[in-house]
Image: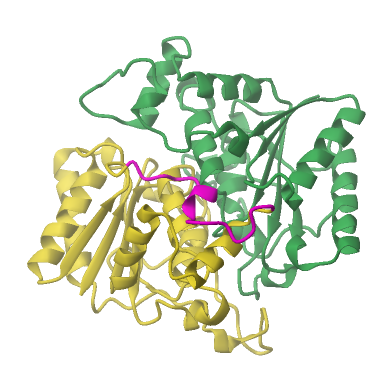
Chain colours: A yellow, B green
Amino acid sequence: MNVLVVYAHPEPKSFNGAMRDLAVRVLGGMGHDVNVSDLYALDFKATADAEDFGTLANPDFFKVQAEQSAAAARGMDFAPDIRHQLDLLLAADLLILQFPLWWFGLPAILKGWVDRVFAAGVTYGGDVGWFSKGRFRGRRAMVAMTTGGGADSFAADGLSGALDVVLWPIQNGMLNFVGFDVLPPYIAYSPARVDAAARAALLADYEARLRAVETTPPLRFHPLEDFDGRRLKPGVAPLTVGQGLPPRGS
Amino acid sequence: MNVLVVYAHPEPKSFNGAMRDLAVRVLGGMGHDVNVSDLYALDFKATADAEDFGTLANPDFFKVQAEQSAAAARGMDFAPDIRHQLDLLLAADLLILQFPLWWFGLPAILKGWVDRVFAAGVTYGGDVGWFSKGRFRGRRAMVAMTTGGGADSFAADGLSGALDVVLWPIQNGMLNFVGFDVLPPYIAYSPARVDAAARAALLADYEARLRAVETTPPLRFHPLEDFDGRRLKPGVAPLTVGQGLPPRGS
């Protein structure tokens, strides 16, 4: 497999850095080609704006998605940093988003990678399709993250709410949206608050997940065939959201 | 009231721009003091990094939240752009986040505003408290956003999922987390796909919401008293998440 790890942490010595290094070593050792987009090291531009395009289709009214589609139609007329990330993304059989959960979401530098690189006309929209008919159907993606709070907080009756709700925008709104099979997330809870042995155990768990990455069953989302327009067909029971996700490692 | 509108759209002539202008005019006309943080116009730095601080408490291991707490303890030793935004935020009785929903979340420039300005040691953490005992308790906050997709997609049986799930990270993870009373969101669905009369109707609906902003009942979240540690006390029924939010305007 060709693997892309998009990694967003400002401190190379962090636990996120250790998870990135582990993924490179383990997946590389399995014979996969592993690329890392280290967004902080790249000083990756987070903000989508007019500089993202070679020329503007409509200089009088700037709309990101319209300019993305127009740039795609002009033969990928994107800024060089976007073109490079798109080359990596389009080649990837497995995408891993590696980050610390900040404010229940992606660090801005990684959200900006999605805003800019998941470009309309390339990753979705028009003839490209979306969801189960999306460009990345048949490929795999996975969240690998750390939290400040503990696992007990991420539950339907927990302070943070159910994990599948917290991750819905990332897992459904980004990864499933463009067609990836979304694997259960790997979450290292509170690595900064546990001792070295517990951190080593977290890394061992992550290694087991990485070794099983080609065979792990993905999370279930509704395929497009379940919908009539934007709503589920009568008789199709909606996915349960808000009850959490399968336990780690399952 | 002192009002802060944090506005994130790259095109001043956009519908988001019209919503911002309406908020300034209507709330100003009601006698409130209205400030706008126009993040694109400010070229606001989205990425949290070491440049955010006057000096580093730990130059050998950079951890954003630890440096934020240390900077707060040194007398608000933050970069000038963060200090300025914190002055506006700490003075606000009402915070409005005005943005287009991109990838089920905040545009990166606005996520970066939260990452950098909702600083540990100032807006939460340590002695500051959080959730119902958070720094902003008794104050109000509100999402005002546009979508590409239509309202029918944002439902428990819709393609995008229930609106309260999509907005959970923003409404619970950011606004409720620091103690705000979170008002029902105002959502302009698909303004780019409707005619001028329908856009005018959306703005009229938003104006009605703005005129009622001091009396609109906030969304319900569990107060800290409902929890024993990180889990709800036995007998407390969890909030229903995944069934959507009250209809617009209610």
Image position, residue A173 (x, y; %): 52, 65
Q: Residue furthest left?
A: A29
Residue B101: % across, % down:
62, 55
Q: Could you say which is closer to the camera, residue A203 or residue B237? A: A203
Q: Nearer the viewer, residue B154 or B128?
A: B154
Magenta segment's dominant SS is: loop
Q: Residue at x 62, y 64 (%)?
A: B242
Q: Please indicate whether residue A25 sits to the left or right of residue A51 in the image.
A: left
- Asked if the magenta segment contains residue A49, the reply would be yes
How far from the left and from the top, in percent, is residue A182?
39, 71
Q: Is residue B222 above or below residue A217?
A: above
x%, y% of residue B115?
48, 36
The answer to whether residue A137 is above or below residue A56 is: below
Q: Is residue B10 above or below residue A215?
A: above
Question: Is residue B24 or residue B127 the one in the foreground?
Answer: B24
In this picture, residue A217 sits left or right of residue A57? left
Of the pair A243 and B58, the residue shown nearer to us: B58
The magenta region covers: A43-60
Question: Hey, which quadrant is residue A11 in on the image?
Answer: top left
For the N terminus of chain B, the quadrant is top right
A140 relative position to B249: left or right: left
Say which residue appears at 27% left-offset and 42% top-offset. A41
Tell me, yes or no, whether the highlighted magenta stretch contains residue B30.
no
